[in-house]
Image (tube, rainbow, N blue to C red):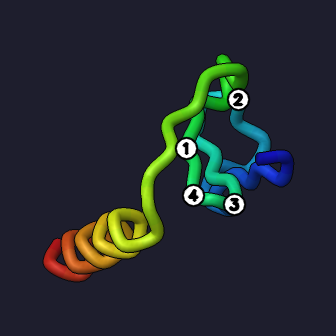
């Protein structure tokens, strides 16, 4: 994985998570290690996050 992206909500903050193709997640403060998850798990995470945001 080489194309890591930060959330647009983090602006220039160093404290955020990044997502990369494949699907991987890592901490921007320590970009070496990362956690790989499958596309269906990532989709479920995004859906749950959006649903929680709408419920607030």
The residue tagged 4 is 23
**Distance from Cα at disc 2 to Cα at disc 1:** 15 Å
Between the residue at mark 3 and the residue at mark 2, the CA separation in whole angstroms equals: 20 Å
For mark 3, give the secondary structure: loop
Q: Residue under label 1, please give it.
A: 25
Q: Nearer the viewer, residue 6 or 2?
A: 2
- Provide the residue designation for mark 2: 14
In this view, the mark in front (2 or 1): 1
7 above or below 14?
A: below
Name the residue located 67 percent from the left edge and 30 percent from the top edge.
Answer: 28
Mark 4 to mark 3 CA distance (whole Å):
5 Å
Q: CA distance from mark 1 to mark 3?
A: 9 Å
Splitting the image into 4 quarters, where does residue 18 fall?
top right
Pick the residue in front: 18 or 9: 18
- Name the residue tied to disc 3: 21
10 Å neighbourhood of mark 4: few (<14), some, or many (≥20)? Answer: some
Element marked by disc 1: strand
Measured in 3D between alpha carbons, the distance from the residue under mark 2 to the one under mark 4, in whole angstroms, is: 21 Å
- Quadrant of the frame with the C terminus: bottom left
Left/right placement of residue 39 relative to residue 11 reads left
């Amino acid at each position: 994985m080489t194309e890591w992206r930060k959330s647009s909500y983090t602006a220039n903050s160093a404290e955020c998570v990044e997502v990369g193709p494949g699907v991987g997640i890592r901490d921007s403060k320590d970009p070496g290690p990362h956690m790989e998850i499958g596309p269906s798990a990532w989709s479920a995470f995004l859906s749950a996050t959006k649903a929680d945001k709408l419920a607030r």
